[in-house]
Image (cartoon, rainbow, N blue to C red):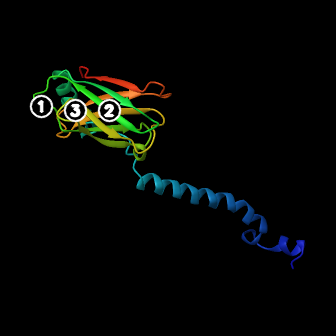
Amino acid sequence: MKTEQEYALDPWYKQPWLLLAMIPLVATVIAGTTFLVVSIVSSDGIVKDDYYREARGYISDPTKLQAAYDKKITAELSVDNLTGDLSLRLGGKFADYPSVITLDFVSPTHQKYDLSIALRQVAGQPFYLGSLAAPINGKRYIMINPGDASWRLRSEINPPFEQRKFSLRAEKP
């Protein structure tokens, strides 16, 4: 064991206080490098709409919303959070109603919380049924698309979900 005088005679890089001064610096470099790697490797994945990249900007494509507006499409969505049952009544100018409707509950924060449900038509009527795997929690965007994705309805719902019926109407984009 060295005495205090022997430690004082050692060069600066052999002093024990150097280790105490270097630990926070090394920890900061390791944490910073870890966060940099995670931010580069992982993607946000939160935008779910008709956007495409043009040069340095993002452009929204309103053709699906315009198609819904031209057909005067409306929808009445009923959600039962207790049983998970979904029912949708569709209205508008249709020659034939689509046999399958895709209902998306899109989370504004992260893609892993999105729900996509296929609703099936009931006996040729403008009425569709489906079921939720889990209750809806938090703010969501509702997006309704037919099987061929020729039009889209969208709306925003906010908690609390005392209201179990949601009306969607095509608006001019």
**Element on which disc 1 rests:** loop
Give, as a three-letter code, the residue at label 1: Asp
SS of the residue under disc 2 = strand
Q: Position of residue 3 (x, y in %)?
A: 89, 75
- Marking on residue 121: none
Q: Local crowd at mark 1 within 10 Å, few (<14), some, or many (≥20)?
A: few
* Residue with the mark numbered 2: 87
- Occupied quadrant, residue 139: top left
Position of residue 44 measured from the top left corner of the image (x, y, whole percent): 40, 46
Residue 62: % across, % down? 22, 29
In this rendered view, identify the residue nearer to me: 106 or 14.
Answer: 106
Q: Is residue 131 left or right of residue 139?
A: left
The answer to which quarter of the image holds residue 169 is: top left
Q: Amino acid at mark 3?
A: Asp
| Mark number displayed over residue 61 | 3
The answer to whether residue 140 is visible is: yes
Which of marks 3 and 1 precedes in the sequence?
Answer: 3
Q: Residue type at mark 2: give it.
A: Ser
Question: Which mark is in front, 2 or 3?
Answer: 2
Q: Is residue 165 above or below residue 116?
A: above
- The residue that label 1 is drawn on is 96
